[in-house]
Image: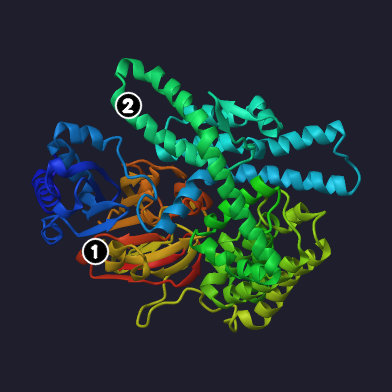
């Protein structure tokens, strides 16, 4: 077994296990690039001060229901030693067991994480078919299609099938979320939308089961009932697993779950959750009836703030429930003004700024906002770093939302709010007033940002990457990563985005400097490239360690706590032992999916052996492109 810089991995592992309460207290152990992650049976047994003083331990963090022991580059060797020392049952548990995503935190955080995990996997399909629904509505309003036309029926079936069978999609994602058998979950959901059950719900005759009256409801397109049913299923299956012999459990458990749970759901869970769904929808309708302007202003003003923190999933749950219970939604309408306002502000930045790098971000970001309603590149790459355009966008989004609320329009199908999906509200309320609200928000934000949102531009030939006082100017993006004079190494940006001090990161370990000095970048593109030339010493989907030929060790860590995604939404392009040059592709990341899953994408670029080097200093601030210098090292 290899030795760590601080000692023998087995000795370190024994010390760590002792301070976390012994091997018997370990329910599971995993690791990411820098830390051991323990799921413990009793957190009270952890001696944190002693653990932090243990040889090889940099820091101890409690987060996500885990005790995280920061080890640095030697974590894999120590983890292997820990696993070899665990009692056999714990070692077996350590492989499959993990804390469910979002299982910790306050109730609202857990709710947001739950909604994200249930809807995110198929949200873009839902949005795409919603766009098709918008097209069908336009064709109907224009008189080119009638609901009785077979062409209309065929197109509508394709566009509406996901939403009609929504309980089955939710059953599959809920089964994964709650640890239930996903195919049994699908069987339960299929029963809810089974043609004869739908017929019973629509009939006038009373329905009984074994002589017990059943209050029938319509479950096509429903949201809440199947989620609760699958949650109950997961607990029932765990109980049956303990009760049934393993030889018969494979077929008896599904049979008993359906036999017990399906009738019980129709008699109890289904009606109760249907009433709850209707109550939520009625509450939202009441708000918009009581004061559509106030409701529209509030949603329009805070919508993009919610997007930044991933909290918009809470409203998405309400919106989709509205479609299921009422066939339309008012809540999504102010989002159109919010998106349009931030897009208008970003387009003004594109025209106003003389910063070439900022233009490169603002132009494509504005286009994605106009056409696709995707605002994350706008928020993180343009408006939020500049502050004024973001604030202008919030105010104008609220004003446009108020006008849209007064218009009384409603969205007839789920679609990502953008200019091209506005026809989804045709045939409801005052559609021209809705258009005025959305376009007005965009134009007002554009004008205000053009006049007041961008500070006086620097001369076109001025340096766009500031250099700290006393430091010599650094070469541009095309410079080699290492210069011969004085063995100065330039660490280049692995991603495009907005830079921030690493001390501002929400992760205690990075912010404290325990892993070295560097910078944080909020990425606007999913392409991650090598910041230096060297050998890949460690490779995880979300983290890459590179050692240069001069001994500099650079860590690129994508996102906060993204190890819990277990590689989902990340695609590695390299492997440990590979040699890379600056700009070579390390990985691609689906930024939207990672944010939708509730994770912060702040990307740390740190020099992990900073303490051994004479000089490690950041040399960039603001919006940068991949390949721009961000750290200068004097070896």
Which residue is pictured at 39% across the width and 72% down the height?
619
Residue 531 left/right relative to 23: right
Which residue is pictured at 64% across the width and 83% down the height?
452
Figure check: 13 above or below 425: above
The residue that disc 1 covers is 514
Say the numbered circle drawn on residue 241: 2
Q: Nearer the viewer, residue 498 or 374?
A: 374
Which residue is pictured at 71% across the width and 31% down the height?
203
Say the numbered circle drawn on residue 347: none
Q: Where residue 145 appears, x then y in whole percent?
A: 88, 40
Q: Is residue 226 visible?
A: no
Q: Where residue 508 appears, x then y in whole percent?
A: 29, 64
* Quadrant location of the C terminus in the rendered image: bottom left
Figure check: 45 above or below 118: below
Residue 133 left/right relative to 90: right
Front tag of 2 and 1: 2
Which of disc 1 and disc 2 is earlier in sequence?
2
Considering the numbered disc 2 on the image, is that residue within a helix, a strand or a loop? helix
Q: Which residue sits furthest right?
A: 143
Q: Which residue sits furthest front?
A: 211
Q: Is residue 128 visible?
A: yes
* Quadrant location of the N terminus in the rendered image: top left
Q: Where residue 585 appears, x then y in whole percent?
A: 46, 48
Considering the numbered disc 1 on the image, is that residue within a helix, a strand or a loop? loop
Q: Nearer the viewer, residue 431 or 191?
A: 191
């Amino acid at each position: 077994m290899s030795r760590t810089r601080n000692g023998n991995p087995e000795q370190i592992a024994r010390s760590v296990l002792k301070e976390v309460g012994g091997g018997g207290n370990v329910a599971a152990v995993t690791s990411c690039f820098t830390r051991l992650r323990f799921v413990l049976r009793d957190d009270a047994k952890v001696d944190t001060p002693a653990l932090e003083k243990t040889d090889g331990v940099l820091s101890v963090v409690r987060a996500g229901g885990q005790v995280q022991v920061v080890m640095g580059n030697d974590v894999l060797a120590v983890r292997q030693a820990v696993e070899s020392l665990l009692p056999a049952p714990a070692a077996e548990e350590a492989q499959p067991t993990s804390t469910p995503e979002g299982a910790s935190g306050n109730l609202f955080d857990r709710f947001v994480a739950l909604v994200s995990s249930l809807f995110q996997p198929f949200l873009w399909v839902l949005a795409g078919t919603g766009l098709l629904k918008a097209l069908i509505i336009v064709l109907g309003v224009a008189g080119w299609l009638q609901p009785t036309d077979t062409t209309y029926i065929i197109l509508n079936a394709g566009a509406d099938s996901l939403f009609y069978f929504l309980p089955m999609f939710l059953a599959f994602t809920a089964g994964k979320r709650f640890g239930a058998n996903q195919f049994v979950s699908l069987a339960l959901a299929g029963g809810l939308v089974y043609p004869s059950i739908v017929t019973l719900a629509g009939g006038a005759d009373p329905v009984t089961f074994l002589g017990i009256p059943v209050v029938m409801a319509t479950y096509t397109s429903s949201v809440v009932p199947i989620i609760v049913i699958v949650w109950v299923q997961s607990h029932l299956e765990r109980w049956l697993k303990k009760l049934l012999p393993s030889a018969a459990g494979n077929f008896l458990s599904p049979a008993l779950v359906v036999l017990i749970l399906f009738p019980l759901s129709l008699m109890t869970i289904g009606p109760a959750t249907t009433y709850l769904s209707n109550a939520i929808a009625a509450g939202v309708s009441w708000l918009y009836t009581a004061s559509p302007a106030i409701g529209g202003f509030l949603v329009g003003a805070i919508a993009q703030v919610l997007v930044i923190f991933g909290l918009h999933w809470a409203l998405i749950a309400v919106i989709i429930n509205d479609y299921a219970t009422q066939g339309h939604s008012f809540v999504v309408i102010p989002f159109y003004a919010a998106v349009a306002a931030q897009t208008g502000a970003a387009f003004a930045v594109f025209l106003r700024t003389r910063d070439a790098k900022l233009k490169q971000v603002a132009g494509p970001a504005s286009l994605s906002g106009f056409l696709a309603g995707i605002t994350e590149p706008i928020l993180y790459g343009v408006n939020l770093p500049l502050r004024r355009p973001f604030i202008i966008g919030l105010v104008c989004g609220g004003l446009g939302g108020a006008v849209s609320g007064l218009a009384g329009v409603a969205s007839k199908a789920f679609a990502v709010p953008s200019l091209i999906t506005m026809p989804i509200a045709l045939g409801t309320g005052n559609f021209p007033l809705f258009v005025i609200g959305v376009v007005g928000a965009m134009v007002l934000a554009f004008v205000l940002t053009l006049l007041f949102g961008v500070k006086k531009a620097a001369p076109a030939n001025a340096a766009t990457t500031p250099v700290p006082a006393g430091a010599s100017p650094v070469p541009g993006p095309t410079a080699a990563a290492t210069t011969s004079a004085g063995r100065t190494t330039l660490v280049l940006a692995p991603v495009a985005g907005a830079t921030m001090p690493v001390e501002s990161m929400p992760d205690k370990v990075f912010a404290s400097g325990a892993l070295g000095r560097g910078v944080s970048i909020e990425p606007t593109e999913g392409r991650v490239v090598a910041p230096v030339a060297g050998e890949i010493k460690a490779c995880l989907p979300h983290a890459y360690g590179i050692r240069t030929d001069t001994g500099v060790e650079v860590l690129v860590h994508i996102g906060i706590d993204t190890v819990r995604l277990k590689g989902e939404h990340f695609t590695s392009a390299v492997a440990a032992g590979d040699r890379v040059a600056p700009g070579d592709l390390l990985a691609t990341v689906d930024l939207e999916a990672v944010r939708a899953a509730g994770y912060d994408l702040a990307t740390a670029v740190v020099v992990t052996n900073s303490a051994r080097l004479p000089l490690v200093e950041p040399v960039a601030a603001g919006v940068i492109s991949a390949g721009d210098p961000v750290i200068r090292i004097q070896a």
